[in-house]
Image: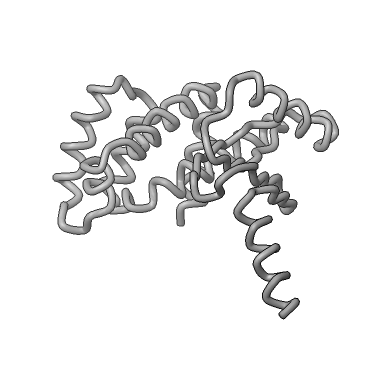
Amino acid sequence: MAGRYATALFELARDQKAVDAVKTDLDTFAALLAGNPDMRRLVRSPVFGAEEQSKALAAVLDKVGIKGLTANFLLLVASNRRLFAVGDMIRGFRGLVAKHKGEVTAEIVVAERLSDAHLEELKSALKSVTGGKAVDLNVKIDPAIIGGLTVKLGSRMVDSSLRTKLNSIKNAMKEAR
């Protein structure tokens, strides 16, 4: 279901030549969801009716400056009682945009925030692996990996995290007994 909504939004945005504007608005909305527990509750909770969700969402969208096609889309999703799946819709839209632009998205997990220089270095290294395609980095911070990083690019994954290395050593020591 989320894929159908994402595809419909992408086709409308492409027809109106507003793909980048819609992507920017959706990124703003996704950041709002990620940083605000009340907003997540509004989106996910079945307690709120479609009318309540639509009213609250309209006020929030107006406050953060999301207008036009993106605002209409999000309000339609709310009125159809599908707001709980908006995260999947946004991910689907991002995937369609990346495919349309010939970009590849890499999921990166690090223990702490990377500097801009390191991010650029990582981007250029991944660009050479993808045959020159532009690479969009989706960086997540997870202190549990202790150090190093994990990179997922398409179906390939490289895990050079300290946690994985320590677990490998632990398993090797158990087998040696």
Left or right? Give the position of 157 relative to 33.
right
Where does residue 12 sit, x and y in percent of width and height? Answer: 50, 33
Residue 92 image position (x, y, % from top left)? 53, 45
Q: Quadrant of residue 70?
A: top left
Q: Nearer the viewer, residue 21 or 136?
A: 136
In the image, residue 104 lies at what x, y percent?
69, 37
Front residue of 94/100: it is 94
Above or below, 29 relative to 107: above
Question: Which colour style is shown?
Answer: one colour
> In the rendered view of the protein, which quadrant contains the C terminus?
bottom right
Total labels drawn: 0
Residue at (46% x, 49% y) in the render? 88
Q: Quadrant of residue 14?
A: top right
The residue located at (60%, 54%) in the rendering is 163
Q: Is residue 120 above or below residue 97?
A: above
Closer to us: 139 or 60 = 139
Q: Position of residue 65 (x, y in %)?
A: 30, 20
Along the viewing direction, whichever of 89 and 124 lies nearer the viewer: 124
Residue furthest to the bottom: 177
